[in-house]
Amino acid sequence: MKKNPERSQKIAFFFLLLANLLIVVPVGLIIVIIVAKGFPALTWEFISQMPRQGMRAGGIFPAIIGTIYLVGGAILFALPIGVLAAIYLCEYATHSRMSRVVKLAIVNLAGVPSVVYGLFGLALFVVFCKFGVSILSGALTLGIMILPIIITASREALESVPPAFREVSLSLGASKWQTIRNIVLPNAIPGILTGAILGLGRASGETAPILFTVAAFYLPRLPSSVFDQVMALPYHLYVISTQVPNVDEKIRYGTALVLLLLVLFMNSVAILIRNKFRKQKRW
Amino acid sequence: MRKCKEWIIEKLVFLCGMASIVFVGLIFLFLLKEGLALFATVNPLEFLAGKKWYPISEPPQMGILPLILGSLLVTVGAAVISVPIGVSCAIYIAEVAPASIKNKLKAGIELLAAIPSVVLGFIGMVTLVPWIKQLFHLPTGLTALSGSIMLAFMAMPTIVSIAEDALYSVPKSYREGALALGATHWQAIYRVIVPAASSGIVAAVMLGIGRVIGETMAVMMITGNSAVMPESILQPVRTLTATIAAEMGEAVVGSEHYFGLFAVGIVLFVISFMINVTADLFLHKNRS
Amino acid sequence: MVKFSVKKLHVWFGAAHILRGVSLDILSNEILSVIGPANSGKTTFLRMLNRLNELEPGFRMNGAIALDGADSLSEDVERLRKRIGMVFAMPLPLPLSIFDNVAYGARMHGIRKTARLQGIVEQALREAYLWDEVKDRLPTSAFNLSGGQQQRLCIARTLAVQPEVILFDEPCSGLDPISTAKVEEAMLKLKRQYTLILVTNNVKQAARVGDRTAFFLNGELIEVNKTDKIFTVPADKRTEDYIRGKFG
């Protein structure tokens, strides 16, 4: 073996390629299976109607709406805080010891298991703040969970704006905030947007954080206030695939497909924005 | 006026900058607040080393050793599968694959990262679980092995993308130096490039494992959730995360069971905190 | 009349001692050229005058700078920078239209009326000898201009905030000879109204446009004098060596 390095290279590269196929082929299969089996279920009625007969018939409309509310609430909360936090790290506290601590906190926030977010949301929002099991509690929990994604993406976007632009603006007598507001932020917006949408995608697929903070097992009506419970797509999929016996396979696959499409749609939008603005950049 | 506005904005920005620290602190604080209440009635040692998890029996028995071992078993299984495959995949993408294939592979892996865990759990339930059952002639396919395979899959995107970054940041001159000495491309990879990127690869593996330990939904759906001391990988097990997710819905706020699940949360938080801090150290070592 | 008075100025970045006790007076309506080899501290000196160095990590200083007799280091930094414009080494248009680039400073200082802004932009572009070349395409991106045009746009942008002093940091280092000549021509006209300080690597450029020339070496001011004196009878041997091209 040792004597023929060319041959051992060929063997090694073959195994490396095999490793890739071991990942990529199953991913393709998963998508194909879900699409093939879920597509027949994907009717307008399925998307626009309330579930009936204990979720064994009817549609998934309230779960879709619930997920949209939750994700919208999460981004409303996380986007301003996340962008300002990124501004703090990139524009105000560069090189300070504090920024090192903040970065470590972000790394940890990103690594907290999703079910622990659920516990936290239960203890803080549901019980301590007395928001109850509600859209508000769930959205805030999801918001904190996607905060690291938004901060990290916004930081990258801010850092990609050349420092020389800041110097030019400051040298003209503009203040720090004017410089950020008029020069840095407009040029960072595509990156920030990308991060925000990736965060949306992540939030719409998460189940564990909403288990005890908002998700309703079976609630065939739309919420009337932020203190209402809602159904949510990922939790609904969990419920009909493990908790409710005798659900038609079509409904399960259909729900999985809708959730997958929602998440993939957001991811593709994020990637499109990123690519479009990368091409447009002039410096 | 302008000064005043600047001052307010600066304070606001500072506050938001501190938000991450505040949230990490709040998470820990609230886990402690609810979790430590358990130890008024339960001995911490019994909690960690007790072999019986019967939280709603009378009196409740709260030993999380079977849960810890369940998590450990599933995690080790997932690591055994995902580390070699993930690192190989990263090496192939970073060093061997031509640009066109490279982009397709990366897109495939990003796609995997985007699939919600509950969808993967569902797919595992309907495909992997029956398959394992048949293959090993088991009474149920909901086993630690099924969980390990699914989790290995979910750890892959983390491992591949971080390891690939680490390999990519090895200076070009290293490889050119090795090639100039007559080494083949493969020799250059395993003798020079991989060792040079080793601390980044270690960080990638750790973060992948962190992802596995914290994973909840998929694991709850396909490991069978039986809280007994695991003896074999072909047996149903229950992890720390699945325990919280499955039981918190029924636990009464303020009951011992409720406190016990928060105590499990503390254990999880501490584990993931340690993994993340260590991985971060490795990542920074790589950069400097 | 003395515009700037710099006294015993020391600057450090971290452990590096960049300026070592520079004392220098700069007169109103003169062009002062600052020459010296790379890393002699001339750009740091320039960026002390509008306090841009304060943005750098590890910056420390010692000494005094007065503008029109008043301490510039305790002055409100934005008001100070409004009085002291700067043109950078590379043409650095902001990612805005030509019009918005020139109007940027004025807008930041609270001028909102379009008619007034149009007047300011036109006058600044005329002073920078760019008006005729760009007057028909003011709303287009500034990145479409040539390098020399971009640099004159940067001069116009500086003029639009009506400064008293303009700092030039090697403004022609990225330009071809024809563009350089146009920028130099603009500078010579500008000195009637403004005080100009020109940091340059190009000794000939200093000789062409400077009324006085200062020679920096290793963070120290070696000598400063009328430009023709420096170039014919320098007082210091090191100045002579540098000008004759023996180092740097």
Image (spheres, helix red, strand yellow):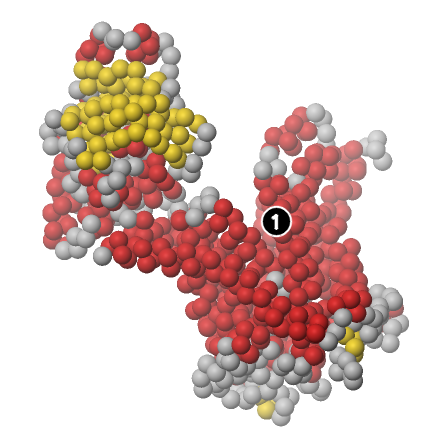
At horizontal 56% and vertical 52% (from top left) the residue drawn is A104
The kind of residue on which mark 1 rests is Asp
Q: Is residue A234 visible?
A: no
Front residue of C192/B145: it is: C192
Q: Is residue C155 above or below residue A260?
A: above
At horizontal 14% and vertical 36% (from top left) the residue drawn is C127
At horizontal 14% and vertical 49% (from top left) the residue drawn is C118
Residue under numbered circle 1 = B280
Q: Is residue B86 above or below residue C248?
A: below
Residue C128 picture location, percent across and down: 17, 35
Front residue of B204/B168: it is: B204
Q: Residues within 10 Å of mark 1 (few under 14, many from 20)?
A: many
Q: Specify the quadrant that holds the N terminus of chain B.
A: bottom left
Front residue of A114/A258: it is: A114
Quadrant of the rendered structure where residue B217 is? bottom right
At horizontal 64% and vertical 45% (from top left) the residue drawn is B282
| A16 left or right of A87 in image | right
Quadrant of the rendered structure where residue B124 is? bottom right
Q: Chain of mark 1?
A: B
Q: Specify the quadrant that holds the C terminus of chain B.
A: top right
Residue B75 picture location, percent across and down: 75, 60
| B168 left or right of B221 in image | left
Residue C240 picture location, percent across and down: 30, 8
Residue A121 picture location, percent across and down: 56, 73
> Label 1's element?
helix
Q: Is residue C44 above or below residue B132?
A: above
Q: Is residue B172 visible?
A: yes
| C142 left or right of A243 in image | left
From this viewpoint, which residue is outermost toward the front?
A: B40
